[in-house]
Amino acid sequence: MGLVRLDTIAREKVELQAKGIRIPQELCDELETEWNAPAIRSGRLVLCLKSPEKSGELIPVFIVNGKRGAKSPLHLVRNGSQFEIWKENEKYTDVFFIPRPGFYNSFTSGGVPMYKVAVIVGPGHARSVVNQRCIYQQAGKPCKFCAIQYWWDANIDKTTLQVAETIEAGVKEGEIEHISLTTATTNTRGKGLESLVEAAKLIQARVKIPIMIEFEPISDYSLLDSLLQEARQAGVTTVSCNIECFDESIREEVMPVKGKNSVEMYVRTWEKCLDIFGKNEVFTVAIAGIGEDDESILKGIEMAA
């Protein structure tokens, strides 16, 4: 029964993310002010499904509505003190929201609202995009699926100090237990990895929490080794180098510049990460539905695993 319910939850999560959710205006106001939805008006929010395996555990679902949200068959309903998703005229599933954390109402030392620096994306889990100006987008050759410059209605030009101050505030409030840091590709030797390492150092100088970083592979393996060693010393516990697509026939079509990074380059990077961070602390992400052959995902994931 547990496996059946877990499969149901997985399918619900996929459908919610694929179709988006219609949200009544009156609920937008409430979600923005009382719950963890500071970017609700730009169509971005995190809701949660309840795990069938662990009592009370919430499974986060990140929603990016885009244009499809207005036409989605799924819509959010307030039923007393509970939230529900309805599909047309029938209840589809219960959903849960994390209360709005107090640090969202605070400001960095430079006067930037902290909710525009880092946000809660799951119970105890905060996330920040340290750099949001991607050189591929600026050159007119973005990855077709990417929206990093519009992530969460955030402050585009953050500093690593602002990130550290925000995480410190969230940890002291008891809302943040671990943090994920990612970056757009920057015009630097490390493609932005340097800023993630710097942010990790500043965070760990204030609070001791697990940190995950996500980065693009770089061809200078000596520099990669040096930066990853620095990251490890700075308290980074987990890393993700996201390949996005295993299908060689469409990689450069979907990712005009990033797709020129060979699969072998990712493999070498994962191997280096494993040497430094160990088993079960190295991740990658593959995106489904961008025109890839299904078999490429199955074989790619098996290869990566």
Image (cartoon, helix red, strand yellow):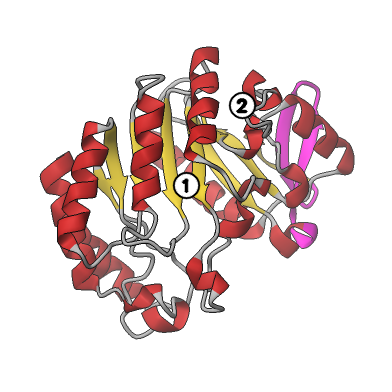
Asked if 199 appears above or below 156 in the picture, the reply is above
Q: Amino acid at mark 2?
A: Ser
Q: Amino acid at mark 1?
A: Ala
Asked if 161 appears above or below 139 in the picture, the reply is above
Q: How many marks?
A: 2
Residue 263 screen position, x and y as percent: 24, 72
Asked if 120 appears above or below 244 in the picture, the reply is above
Residue appearing at x 41%, y 20% in the figure: 206
Q: Is residue 11 left or right of residue 203?
A: right
Residue appearing at x 54%, y 55% in the figure: 132
Residue 103 screen position, x and y as percent: 63, 22
Q: In this orientation, which residue lies closer to the viewer: 71 or 234?
A: 234
Residue 111 screen position, x and y as percent: 68, 31
Q: Which residue is mark 1?
A: 10
Q: Is residue 194 left or right of residue 223?
A: right
Residue 94 screen position, x and y as percent: 65, 34
